[in-house]
Amino acid sequence: MSSEKIATKIVELIRQHFPWGQRDCPPRPADDDPIVVEKSATGWIKNRVNSTSLESTALALHARIQAVVEEMQDQLPPNERSRFFYRSDLTHLMKSPESILDKMAREWEAGKGKAPRVGFDDFAESMDDLARFRIVLNFLADVEIVCVKLEEPYKVAPGGRSRLTPKQQALYNDFALRDHCLEDLIMLGPKDRLSGERCRKGVFSLRKDGLVRVEVQIQTMLQEAWDKKDHFLVYEPRRRGEDVEPCHSIEIYAMSELLYVADLTFDRLLDIIRKRRSGGGGD
Amino acid sequence: MRMRDEQLKTCKALTWVDETGKLKSRALLFLVRGAEDITPLDALQVACRARIAARGYSAFEWHAVADPGQISTVDRRLYNAEIVRFEACEFQNLNGGQLASLLDPIIDHIAAGHPELVPRVGGAVGGPAEGIQFLNRLCEVAELIASIRAGESIFLQAPRRMGKTSLMRRVQKEIEGEFTTLALNLERDPSPAECAARLRSIQTGEGFHTALRAAKPDPHRVLTDSLDALCAHSEKSVVLFVDELVALFEGIKVEDAQEDARRSHVLSFLSAMAEPLDKHSARLVVAGSVNWQAYLDSELEITHDELPGLFSRLQKLIIHPLDLENPECELRRLLLGSGLVADPADMSWLLEHVDLALPFPATRFLDSVLAETKRRGATDRSALDELLRDFLKTTEAFADFDNHLRSKCPIPGASDRVALVLGRIASQPFGDGASQDEVETILLGLEEHESKRLKAWLVDTFPVKDEDDHFRFVSRLFHQWWQSQIAEERRNHE
């Protein structure tokens, strides 16, 4: 769908399906200006999101995951600690109202008289990524071991929970993990791959209120670097209504593959160097 | 009770950046550990936002922060921000009103660029409480300022450690600009020569010891001249604050062995001070743990009619123990400032045993809790019980009350009866107290005026209030201390 079309579709979605004047929604603006229409909806969405405990829940989840990752870091051999580092990105913890509208509009079959699949009444319950954050790691192998540590409490049989560390147990006690695993968008075959996005992705929900969910992405620095560039070069221009050349999209997608190969190479080198060190040869 | 875990990293940060760049940026971090923090984190943000909106503050922003060490990544202007950490759970189980009581002053202090945000245990131990350490005597502050504005001179009376000096300093600070304020601490300068030298030093700018040499030959003249010059050269009315006047009388007692000489010396000193103050319509605020007029009457037979000028017109203002509107909030503010984290069970123990009606002993006790918690890592209820027992056994924080009872009872020979009244109140659960009838029974045999005076002295001198036909202690710590004194006495008898 072209960018211009999505911008028009968003305004049309709001005009037709925003519950004007109902409950706590503002009344329909008199002049029907697209900017005013969109502003009314984004303002309401922002208030709606702020009225939930989503952000605080996301921070609580981050604190629990951070504790598990740091515990892991402390358990590494001293010479590995400095190369194992992680960074959390909480700057976009909450999905913006504009992104929420964008997603709603993309999934809406306009012109067929149908309500959107995700509507204004249920977007908070339907969207998994209203709150999300990333844990960015150095090597691909680090992503793997962090994911193993985070999945372990959910995969282990109840009798084996005593093996869990207190930090893992605390994560498990506070949050459930959908499907007991982090979805793998790294080892995805060509046929199944829809975009260049590469990460491990999990949806955690608060145990005392399963409707409050937070998406967590775990990826390497190179995967994050690709994502940030893609966001600026492709995602944002499309959101603003600008066209993105198909050849640019193809090239950017290819860059994701290239960086994956780079990650594999770095991991291979890391493995060789580790083995040499453990064999006493040094490097 | 445990110490705040400042190693926690994930937090919601309320930041404040001074657009003018004159004041240091601030970041208030609400640290998060897990799901138990969600509700308090939401609630405290609502409270902070309400205050910020109500006051129209514009420089505050909220940020989700993964690592406080990298706070400048959320806003580069925070690179050298002063960071204050709290755990979100320190605000758990509080309603909107309680959160507002705790957080509103913090927001206001940040917006005003004040360096300190919350009082801390030990912050005022050993000295007068100033700034943030000054615990809520707003009524007395307002009353004293109103009296000064009305041209009155005041005598502030309360036992030691009740907060007289702190109150005087607060008032002095608040009226600066409107009045010219001068302060004398006669415990530090307990002779007429030193007192005169202090004023001369302020007036001329010369060093204290130089001024002392000049004052020694004729202290009263130097006192009068210096005070006269200070008042004459001030564009605003002068308010002279004198702390512990009786210390000077005691100083004179050491200098002059003969009672007649002392009597004349004291009266000359008071005249030397009163004359310039009267001449320039200045105000005088005298504070003391001992009623100086009663002292002069009993020690030197100087009657009220003999007192010169302003000293005969001082209005008495009694400073009672702090009767805090929200004692739990004040206690929590102290814990916040000290980094002590109390879970609900700890908090109920504290509210059952401690209050800030008498700030000095309360902060001393909490200081010992802080030290023990730092040492052990955590203190449970049995450790708190033990700490309290030790504190009550060894503290000298209440010694002045004992001293007053033994030597300053206004009715000769009646101190035993007052002790019985205090014992009767202490034998009842805190809050129940002793009825008027019970007190009357103990005071039976005294003249009516004596009984009345004794009851008034009891309320003015001890942390006792006379309300609803009952005498009750206002300080839980004092209640327990008195109980422990009785128990100790009983053991000694046995």
Image (cartoon, grey):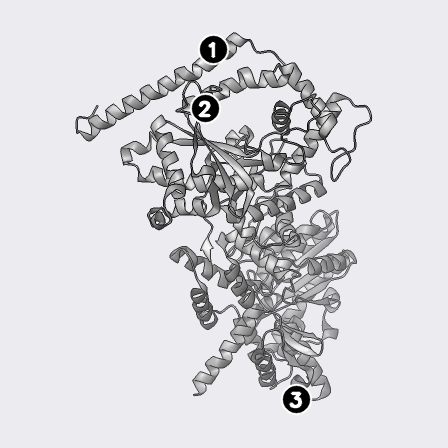
Mark 2 and mark 3: span between their CA atoms? 84 Å
| Residue at x 50%, y 21% (from the top left corner) | A228
On screen, A251 above or below B471? above
Numbered mark located on residue A251 in the image: 1
Quick one: label 2, few (<14), some, or many (20+) residues within 10 Å?
A: many
Depth check, front residue: B160 or A1: A1
Indicate the quadrant where residue B14 lies: top right
Q: Secondary structure at mark 3?
A: helix
Chain of the residue under the numbered disc 2 shown in the image: A
Q: Which residue is mark 3?
A: B441
Numbered mark located on residue A224 in the image: 2
Residue type marked 2? Glu
Circles 2 and 3 on the same chain: no
x, y percent for residue B100: 65, 50
In which quadrant will I find the N terminus of chain A? top right
Chain of the residue under the numbered disc 1 shown in the image: A
Q: Nearer the viewer, mark 2 or mark 3?
A: 2
Quick one: label 3, few (<14), some, or many (20+) residues within 10 Å?
A: few
